[in-house]
């Protein structure tokens, strides 16, 4: 649970400025950036993600480092699974079915 | 990518290991606790114990959220799930933690409405989409996770949701470290401090450990080299008779932590007078409760929960392992009745649990492919 996941911000939501579209290993999901200072991150920036929230802003080198660490720990697939699982901000009517 | 390659370079790791071997005082025994379960996982995964000098003993700490949650609290959560019209949302790690009447997964199979989520915000969304249901989020975790729960509760208030609550089980790491230092059967010479907890809390909360107890604390990252370097930094301090808080994980951990996250926690949570930890017993001011001003989101206020204390399953010695008094294979059930497929105790559930890590990498190392 303590291993955070690195991702790159694709865009910040215009309607909800606390939501950022983030890409991790080819998967895009929304994460909450409310634990960072306002304006701290923008499109193209890298962040560390934990349970749907950005914990810290990192640089690209650190992001690759963190990804390699997850691979070395055998946790990279779980990380992608977790990112796929963040559906709180996606307009998906089927969500409730998937969740059951 | 040079930086990363350096981290993975076996030559550099053996270089630090050689430096450690040169630095240790052969006449001395060093007991170093790695506080965080993520470190425990990395240590076993990468076989780091094999490159340490024999007089450095690593003691696994209490930094595994599902491991320290006492069985009684699991039962309390499952009692909430058993109520009509209530759905309980849990993280994946929680789903396989045994309560007295089974794990959340088993109770789900028997018909309870229990859902696995990856984020507290997903639990909130289930509440939004199911106005006829009450959705309770079973929150666990240290300071890494608690700010996310705080923001989720703030968001619930913003949305005006009346069918969402949190069964709050967040704990804080520093009082547990103090309890270990005060425990008569624990002798720890220094600590490898947690990485991502410290990204939130910063390094200041550990200063009393150096100042009042005279023990070094080195906050560390999760790479093998990070952990070895941190151990070397602890050993150097001990040899020089020093006790300071050092930050080996500067690339992620600011000395002052994450102020917005700390503010969110302070807004929503307050310290409980005491909280029970598996193995460590009751520790004062070691856990978070939801403040009175957010009582409508507090499952403990909304529901009658049993609140019964339950001892560990018969034969399982989770508490002793959690305190570092026993090593995992010294438990009577280890590897036989208790294994990752059928965990009897919580330490066998999470990859951060000492027993699961030991089982996967130390006992059956031959069956596990070498790390890339």
Image (cartoon, rainbow, N blue to C red):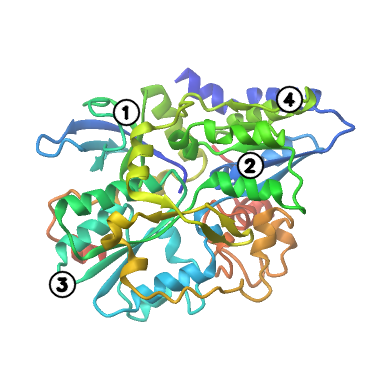
Callouts 3 and 2 in the same chain: yes
**Residue depicted at x 73% and y 25%:** B242
Secondary structure category for the residue under label 1? strand
Cβ atoms at labels 3 and 4 below 8 Å apart: no
Callouts 3 and 1 in the same chain: no
User: Can you identify the residue that label 3 sits on?
Assistant: B132
Task: Give me the chain letter of mark 3.
Answer: B
Q: Residue B296's spot in the image, x, y percent? A: 26, 62
Q: Which residue is at the front of the view, B238 or A69?
A: B238
User: Can you identify the residue that label 1 sits on?
Assistant: A46
Query: Disc 4 and disc 1: Cα gap in Å?
Result: 37 Å
User: Can you identify the residue that label 4 sits on?
Assistant: B242
Who comes first in sequence, dot 3 or dot 4?
Answer: 3
Alpha-carbon neighbours of circle 3 within 10 Å: few (<14), some, or many (≥20)? few
**Residue depicted at x 90% and y 32%:** B27
- Residue most toward the right? B27
Alpha-carbon neighbours of circle 1 within 10 Å: few (<14), some, or many (≥20)? many
Who comes first in sequence, dot 3 or dot 2?
Answer: 2
Query: Disc 3 and disc 4: Cα gap in Å?
Result: 60 Å
Callouts 3 and 4 in the same chain: yes
Query: Relative to residue B249, is residue B112 drawn left or right?
Result: left
Task: Give me the chain letter of mark 2.
Answer: B
Secondary structure category for the residue under label 3? loop
User: Can you identify the residue that label 2 sits on?
Assistant: B34
Q: Quarter of the image for the C terminus of chain A: give it.
A: bottom left
Q: Residue B221's spot in the image, x, y percent? A: 54, 33
Q: Quadrant of residue B189?
A: top right
Callouts 4 and 2 in the same chain: yes
Q: In this view, does B311 lie above or below B227?
A: below
Cβ atoms at labels 4 and 2 below 8 Å apart: no
Task: Give me the chain letter of mark 1.
Answer: A
């Amino acid at each position: 649970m303590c291993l955070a996941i690195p991702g790159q911000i694709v865009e910040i939501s215009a309607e909800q400025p606390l939501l950022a579209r983030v890409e991790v290993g080819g998967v895009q999901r929304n994460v909450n950036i409310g634990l960072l200072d306002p304006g701290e991150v923008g499109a193209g920036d890298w962040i560390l993600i934990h349970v749907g929230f950005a914990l810290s802003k990192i640089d690209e080198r650190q992001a690759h480092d963190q990804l390699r660490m997850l691979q070395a720990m055998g946790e990279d697939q779980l990380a992608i699974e977790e990112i796929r699982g963040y559906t709180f901000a996606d307009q998906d009517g089927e969500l409730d079915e998937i969740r059951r | 990518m040079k930086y990363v390659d350096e981290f993975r370079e076996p030559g550099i790791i053996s270089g630090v290991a050689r430096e450690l071997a040169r630095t240790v005082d052969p006449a001395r025994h060093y007991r170093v606790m790695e506080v965080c379960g993520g470190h425990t996982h990395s240590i076993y995964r990468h076989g780091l114990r094999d490159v340490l000098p024999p007089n450095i003993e690593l003691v696994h700490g209490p930094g595994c959220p599902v491991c320290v949650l006492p069985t009684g609290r699991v039962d309390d959560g499952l009692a909430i799930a058993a109520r009509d019209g209530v759905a309980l949302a849990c993280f994946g790690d929680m789903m396989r933690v045994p309560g007295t009447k089974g794990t959340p997964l088993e109770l789900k199979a028997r018909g309870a409405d229990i859902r696995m989520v990856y984020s507290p915000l997903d639990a909130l969304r289930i509440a939004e989409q199911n106005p006829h249901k009450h959705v309770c989020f079973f929150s666990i975790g240290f300071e890494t996770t608690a700010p996310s729960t705080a923001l989720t509760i703030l968001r619930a208030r913003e949305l005006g949701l009346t069918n969402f609550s949190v069964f709050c089980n967040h704990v804080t790491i520093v009082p547990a470290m103090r309890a270990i230092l005060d425990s008569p059967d624990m002798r720890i010479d220094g600590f490898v401090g947690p990485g991502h907890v410290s990204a939130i809390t910063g390094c200041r909360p550990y200063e009393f450990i150096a100042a009042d107890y005279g023990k070094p604390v080195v906050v560390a990252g999760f790479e093998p080299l990070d952990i070895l370097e941190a151990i070397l930094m602890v050993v150097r301090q001990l040899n020089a008779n020093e006790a300071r808080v050092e930050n080996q994980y500067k690339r992620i951990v600011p000395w002052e932590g994450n102020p917005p996250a700390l503010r969110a926690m302070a807004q929503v949570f307050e310290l409980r007078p005491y909280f029970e930890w598996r193995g460590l017993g009751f520790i004062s001011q070691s856990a978070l409760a939801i403040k009175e001003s957010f009582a409508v989101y507090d499952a403990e206020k909304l529901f009658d929960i049993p609140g019964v204390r339950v001892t560990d399953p018969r034969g399982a010695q989770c508490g002793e392992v959690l305190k570092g008094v026993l090593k995992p294979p010294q438990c009577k059930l280890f590897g036989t009745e208790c294994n990752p497929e059928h965990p009897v105790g919580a330490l066998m559930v999470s990859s951060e649990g000492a027993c699961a890590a030991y089982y996967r990498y130390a006992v059956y190392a031959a069956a596990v492919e070498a790390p890339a």
